[in-house]
Amino acid sequence: MQSQDYLVISPVKPSKTAKIAGAAVFGALAWFLAVPEFFKIPFYPLTYLTFDFAEIPVMFSFLVFGPAAGIISSVVLWGTLNFVGSTGTFGATMKFIAVASAALGLWIGVSLYSKVSSKIALKGALASGFIFSLLLRVAIMTVANYVALTIVFPDFMGFAVDMLAKANIVDATAPFSGIVAILLITGVYNTIHTALSLIPSYFLSTIPSSSTALKMGRPWITSIQAKKQNP
């Protein structure tokens, strides 16, 4: 069935080799977009948090080649950032946790939608995936940031609180309100970053010329619909 409401089914499935190669290529592209400082947009008032375009290739890889490819792209990004990146292993690991949790949430949301719906519609599947991606990323990154600020790098929490105090958001002498404010603001940052990563990835993956240029055949997300329509 071909319409604006349902995903278009291609008769060709991408091979495993194509999936692995695609995942590696888009992971490398993600690294290329993550390293240059001019690609980064600071998030006020915690300007050590930055928006970048690195997550778009990872999410594109996920939507086109599937969950495993999305994770492979995330691992490639993590590995390359460990060797060539300004934030070192810690920053690369936090980036990996953020991207992987968003990808996992996307998979959970789309998979659950496909199980409860008689027909997997494009808007419904992606809306479900987006919601779970956002919720899981914010939840996991809140825990990760709390551990990082209170256990791994407790001195950095003072630096972050001072940034909020200079912006007249918290009192620098109130550490509890400081950590709460940091986690809430970081949650807003991760919410925005999820949208900035998923929305462009979706539109790029649905450009007809993308399938032809990449010879990717049927994108992963459409294969779920195919199975639903032809059990």
Image (tube, grey):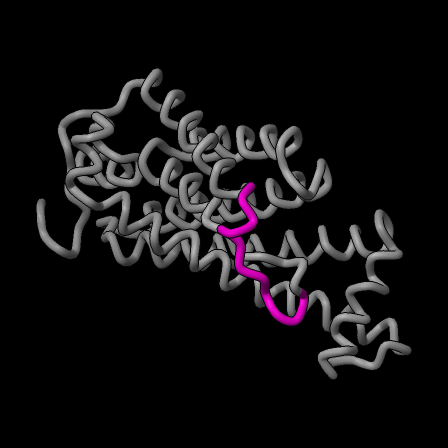
If the image is split into quadrants, where does the N terminus sit?
A: top left
- Residue 51: horizontal and vertical position, in percent? 53, 56
Left/right of residue 180 with respect to residue 110 in the rendered view: right
Magenta range is 35-46
Q: Quadrant of the C terminus?
A: top left
Looking at the image, residue 159 lies above or below residue 13: below
Residue 128 locus on image (x, y percent): 38, 56
Q: Residue at x 77, y 65 (%)?
A: 160
Q: Quadrant of residue 11?
A: top left
**Along the line of sight, the residue nearer the viewer: 228 or 55:** 55
Coordinates of residue 167 in the picture (x, y in percent): 71, 79
Please, which residue is most extreme toward the top here? 17
The residue at 81%/56% (across/down) is 149
Residue 154, magenta (yes or no): no
Q: Is residue 33 left or right of residue 214?
A: right
Please tell me whether residue 39 belongs to the stretch shown in magenta: yes
Q: Say if 83 sits above or below 143 in the image.
A: above
The image shows residue 185 at horizontal and vertical percentages of: 65, 69
Q: Decide: is 50 above or below 63.
A: below
Q: Residue at the spot x=76%, y=78% of the render?
A: 166
Q: List the single residue furthest toward the front.
A: 38
